Amino acid sequence: MDEQEFLAAYDPSAYPSTAVTVDVVALTIRDGALHLLLIRRAAPPYEGHWALPGGFVHPDEDLTTGARRELAEETGLGGDRLRRVHLEQLGSYGTPDRDPRMRIVSVAHLAFAPDLPDPVADTDAADAIWLPVTALSSRQLAFDHDRIIADGLERARSKLEYTPLATRFLEPEFTISELRGVYETVWGHPLHAGNFHRKVLSVPGFVESTGASTERGGARGGPRAKLYRAGDARLLHPALLRPAREEAVR
């Protein structure tokens, strides 16, 4: 039997059916705090519970396209703003009983960008909000989304240690102080300003100077701050370790 004959005789119904979905852990910084995008389900299963934006992958989509579509539907983002969002696969979640409808495998994605707009609830959602991650315990979450969110937060925090992705939370031009604010917000720890400034500038390719400065000085009338942009580094060497991990290394 050649391949065409095999495929013509192949019966998919002879095997258990499995569906594929995408879920998006979307993070942004609003009012100096790390926020997560959640939607409130308008229909069973888990009606009224909060969940990550996501849904079934369309027959003509790959996984990344499906994740971008779901993110666009819940945020109203499109065009250049959507392309500026950092999006990467986080992991696959396939526990047999994770969804009461049928066997569903979800491929979760992690997304983050600066100052994402107020969400717009799609047709299958009763509401959509940006929730501070510190308030997650106040919400009933659907499916296994508590585990996916925990994995997404840890991925984001660890990637800030060894990649320059913190710059994706900022506008194209930023100060070192603003960059430090991203690290403090995502890690949840205050950092020494002088030490952080020294470490950032010692990492080749992390940031590069624009040659410009802020229009005004600091809040106390200090000198204007220099502006930087993301450099061409893909990995940070040496890495910027979280305070607890830095202590453990010493």
Image (cartoon, rainbow, N blue to C red):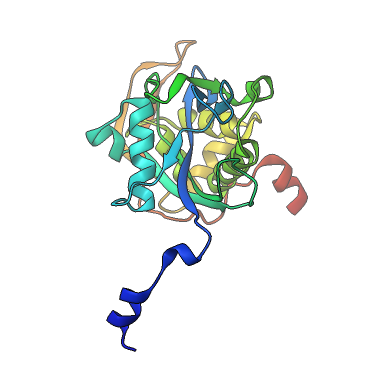
36 or 159: nearer the viewer: 36
Identity of the residue furthest to the left in this view: 79
Identity of the residue furthest to the top in this view: 220
181 or 35: nearer the viewer: 35
Q: Position of residue 43 (x, y in %)?
A: 50, 25
Q: Position of residue 191 (x, y in %)?
A: 63, 32
30 horizontally vs 226: left or right: right
226 or 20: nearer the viewer: 20
- The quadrant in which the N terminus is found is bottom left
The image quarter in which residue 77 lies:
top left
**Residue 149 versus residue 15 in the image, above or below:** above
**Residue 122 versus residue 169 in the image, above or below:** above
**Residue 122 versus residue 145 in the image, above or below:** above
Q: Position of residue 76 (x, y in %)?
A: 31, 25
132 horizontally vs 55: left or right: right
Q: Is residue 118 visible?
A: yes
* Total labels drawn: 0
x 60%, y 26%: residue: 133
Q: Is residue 250 visible?
A: no
x 64%, y 28%: residue: 190
Q: Position of residue 90 (x, y in %)?
A: 52, 49
x 54%, y 44%: residue: 160
15 or 77: nearer the viewer: 15
x 37%, y 20%: residue: 120
